[in-house]
Image (tube, rainbow, N blue to C red):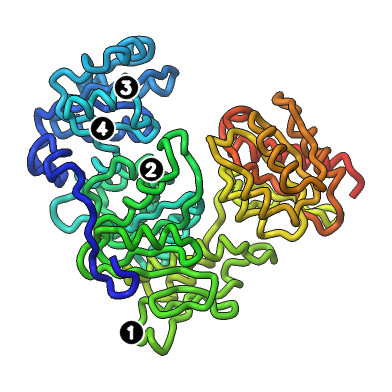
C-alpha cells in the first residue's frame, strides 16, 4: 500500500483460498451452519459466547477446557442443556495427551485467545488439515448478511483500550449506536449478535486475536505502536509484529499509523488492502497532508477535509483532555489523535470528536493520580505491563521515583532503563523478575539508588510505598509503572494498582499533613 496515494499493495497468499473453510459459504450468520462439527478450545468469556452462538445455529459443539472452578461449571451446565459435549478439567488434561483423538470427525476448531499456537491440540489440528479460527474470525462470519455494522479496528502494544473507549465516545456523540467491543468491554460476538443492531463497532484486537484472523475487512484500522511484548506467546518479535500487522488486512477506507513509530508505517506499506484505502498518520508534530496532529495546542485534521492541501479542521484542544488541572501526557494525546482519525474515517464531524474527548473518562490504573502530599504526586499506572507502556509513562514526568517489576514476559529492559535514567530519583523493585531490572540499572543508571523488596505477601506494597517515600523530594512523582505483568504477586494489574493506592493512603494517613 502506498502511504499517500491509497493504492493497494500485494501480500503473499495465505495457504490458498479454501484452507480455512470447513464448508463453503460460511460468511454470515444465516449461512448453512447446521450439522457442522466444531471443537471450541477454551470456555472462558469468548469461548462460551462462541459455543452458544454455534449451538443456536444447529452446530454440534465439543467444548474442551482444562480449567476448573465454579464459573466454568456454571457455563458448562448451560452448554450441556443446549446439547454441547464437554471435556473438562482433569479429563481434558488427560485427553490433551492424545489431541488427535479429540479431533476425530471435527470440521473446525474455534480457539480462545489464551491458547497459544503451539498448544498440542492446535498443532494437531493444523497437521490434520482442520481449520482453526479465533473467536474474532467467527464473530466476523456471524454478522448479518445485509448491512452489517462496519468495524473500526484497533491494535498496538499499548493504548488500545484508551483509543477504543475514546472512539466509542466520539461515535456516540455523533448520534450513532456504537459499542466498544473485542478485547475490552462487550465480547465481540455479543456485539455482533445483539438484538438491537449497532451502527458501528469499535473493536479492540490483541495480537492473540489477530493471529487467527483470516477474513476481516474493517472500514478503518490502526496499529498504535509496536514494542516487544508477548514474545513468549508468539515465539519472536517478528511473529508478534506480523500478528499486529493483520489489523490492516482488507481495510476499506483508511489505514491509520503512528508517524513516530516506523514499524507501524511499514505494516501499512506491506498491507494488502481494498483498492482506494488511504494511509493516514497521526503525529504529535504539525500534521502534513493526510495526517492528524498538533498545531500548538489544537488537535488538527489534514486528512479528512476537502481542502487538506491548504487547510485543516480543528478537532479539539489539549484543554479538552486536561483532567483535574493536569495536562495530558504525550501518549494520551497520541491516543486521542488515533481515535479521532478512525472517527473521521467513518465520517464523524469535528464537533462530535471534540465532545467525545471532553466526555472521556480514563480507565482505572492508567496514569491515575492517587494523591498529592508535600508536593509529591503518587501515580498509579499499573496497566503499564510492558516496557513500551512504562517508557511512555516515565517520559511524562521530569523526576520520578519508579516502582517496577513483576513478570517481564521475555522483554528486554535495557532500552527502557537507558532512556529513563536521567529522570530517575530512585527505583523500588518488586516481583519475580526484579533482578533483571536491577542489572539494567547497574549498567545504565549506576548513580540511581535501587531498593529491592523481595516480599510477596500482603504487606509488600506498604514496604514499597515507605521506600519510595523515603527517596521522593518535593516536585517528584512516585510512579507505579511496573513494565511487567502482575500475576506473580497479584490476581491482575488492577489488584496491583489497588494495593498500591491503598498503601499510599495508609502511608499518608500516618504522616503529618
Classify mark 3: residues with Cα within 10 Å, few (<14), some (14-19) or many (20+).
some
Q: Quadrant of residue 351?
A: bottom left
Q: Which mark is residue 306?
A: 1
- Disc 3 versus disc 4: nearer the observer: 3
Distance (Cα) linking label 4 and label 1: 44 Å
Classify mark 2: residues with Cα within 10 Å, few (<14), some (14-19) or many (20+).
some
Q: Nearer the viewer, residue 248 or 165?
A: 248
Q: Which mark is residue 120?
A: 3
- Which circle's residue, 4 or 2, is located before the other in the chain? 4
Q: Which residue is mark 4?
A: 110
Distance (Cα) linking label 2 and label 3: 19 Å
Q: Is any part of residue 204 visible from this angle?
A: yes
- Residue occupying the far right of the picture: 512
Distance (Cα) linking label 2 and label 1: 39 Å
- Disc 1 versus disc 3: nearer the observer: 3
Q: Is any part of residue 172 visible from this angle?
A: no
Q: Position of residue 298 (x, y in %)?
A: 55, 78
Q: Is residue 281 left or right of residue 387?
A: left
Q: Residue at x 26, y 53 (%)?
A: 197
Q: Residue at x 28, y 75 (%)?
A: 5
- Residue occupying the far front of the picture: 443
Q: Which residue is mark 2?
A: 239
Distance (Cα) linking label 3 and label 4: 14 Å
- Which circle's residue, 4 or 1, is located before the other in the chain? 4
Q: Residue at x 33, y 53 (%)?
A: 247
Q: Residue at x 42, y 59 (%)?
A: 264
- Which circle's residue, 3 or 4, is located before the other in the chain? 4
Amino acid at each position: 500500500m502506498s502511504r499517500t496515494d491509497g493504492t493497494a499493495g500485494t501480500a503473499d497468499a495465505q495457504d490458498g483460498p479454501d484452507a480455512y473453510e470447513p464448508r463453503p459459504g460460511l460468511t454470515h450468520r444465516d449461512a448453512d451452519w447446521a450439522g457442522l462439527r466444531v471443537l471450541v478450545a477454551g470456555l472462558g468469556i469468548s469461548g462460551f459466547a462462541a459455543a452458544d452462538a454455534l449451538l443456536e445455529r444447529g452446530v454440534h459443539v465439543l467444548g474442551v477446557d482444562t480449567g476448573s472452578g465454579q464459573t466454568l461449571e456454571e457455563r458448562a451446565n448451560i452448554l450441556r442443556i443446549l446439547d454441547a459435549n464437554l471435556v473438562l478439567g482433569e479429563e481434558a488434561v488427560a485427553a490433551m495427551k492424545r489431541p488427535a483423538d479429540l479431533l476425530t470427525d471435527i470440521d473446525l476448531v474455534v480457539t480462545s485467545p489464551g491458547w497459544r499456537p503451539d498448544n498440542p491440540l492446535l498443532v494437531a489440528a493444523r497437521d490434520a488439515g482442520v481449520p482453526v479460527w479465533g473467536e474474532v474470525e467467527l464473530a466476523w462470519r456471524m454478522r448479518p448478511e445485509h448491512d452489517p455494522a462496519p468495524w473500526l479496528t484497533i491494535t498496538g502494544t499499548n493504548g488500545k483500550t484508551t483509543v477504543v473507549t475514546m472512539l466509542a465516545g466520539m461515535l456516540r456523540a455523533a448520534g450513532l449506536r456504537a459499542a466498544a467491543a473485542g478485547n475490552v468491554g462487550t465480547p465481540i460476538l455479543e456485539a455482533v449478535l445483539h438484538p438491537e443492531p449497532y451502527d458501528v463497532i469499535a473493536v479492540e484486537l490483541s495480537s492473540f486475536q489477530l493471529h487467527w484472523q483470516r477474513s476481516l475487512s474493517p472500514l478503518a484500522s490502526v496499529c498504535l505502536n509496536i514494542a516487544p511484548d508477548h514474545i513468549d506467546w508468539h515465539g519472536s518479535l517478528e511473529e508478534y509484529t506480523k500478528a499486529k500487522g493483520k489489523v490492516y488486512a482488507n481495510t476499506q477506507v483508511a489505514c491509520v499509523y503512528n508517524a513516530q513509530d516506523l514499524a507501524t508505517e511499514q505494516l501499512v506499506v506491506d498491507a494488502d488492502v481494498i483498492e482506494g484505502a488511504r494511509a493516514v498518520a497521526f503525529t504529535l508534530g504539525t500534521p502534513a497532508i493526510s495526517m492528524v496532529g498538533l498545531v500548538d495546542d489544537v488537535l488538527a485534521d489534514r486528512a479528512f477535509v476537502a481542502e487538506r492541501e491548504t487547510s485543516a479542521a480543528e478537532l479539539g484542544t489539549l484543554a479538552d483532555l486536561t483532567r483535574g488541572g493536569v495536562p495530558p501526557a504525550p501518549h494520551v494525546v497520541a491516543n486521542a489523535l488515533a481515535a479521532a482519525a478512525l472517527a473521521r474515517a467513518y465520517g464523524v464531524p469535528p464537533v462530535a470528536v471534540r465532545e467525545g474527548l471532553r466526555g472521556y473518562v480514563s480507565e482505572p490504573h492508567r496514569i491515575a493520580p492517587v494523591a498529592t502530599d508535600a508536593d509529591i504526586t503518587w501515580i498509579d499506572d499499573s496497566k503499564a505491563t510492558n516496557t513500551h507502556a512504562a517508557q511512555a509513562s516515565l517520559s511524562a514526568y521530569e523526576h520520578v521515583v519508579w516502582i517496577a517489576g513483576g513478570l517481564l514476559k521475555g522483554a528486554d529492559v535495557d532500552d527502557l532503563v537507558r532512556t529513563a535514567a536521567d529522570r530517575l530519583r530512585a527505583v523500588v523493585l518488586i516481583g519475580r523478575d526484579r533482578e533483571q531490572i536491577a542489572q539494567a540499572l547497574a549498567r545504565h543508571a549506576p548513580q540511581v539508588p535501587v531498593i529491592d523488596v523481595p516480599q510477596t505477601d500482603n504487606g509488600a506494597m506498604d514496604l514499597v510505598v515507605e521506600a519510595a517515600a523515603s527517596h521522593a523530594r518535593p516536585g517528584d512523582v512516585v510512579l507505579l509503572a511496573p513494565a511487567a505483568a502482575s500475576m506473580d504477586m497479584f490476581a491482575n494489574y488492577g489488584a496491583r494498582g489497588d494495593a498500591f493506592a491503598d498503601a499510599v493512603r495508609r502511608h499518608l494517613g500516618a504522616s503529618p499533613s
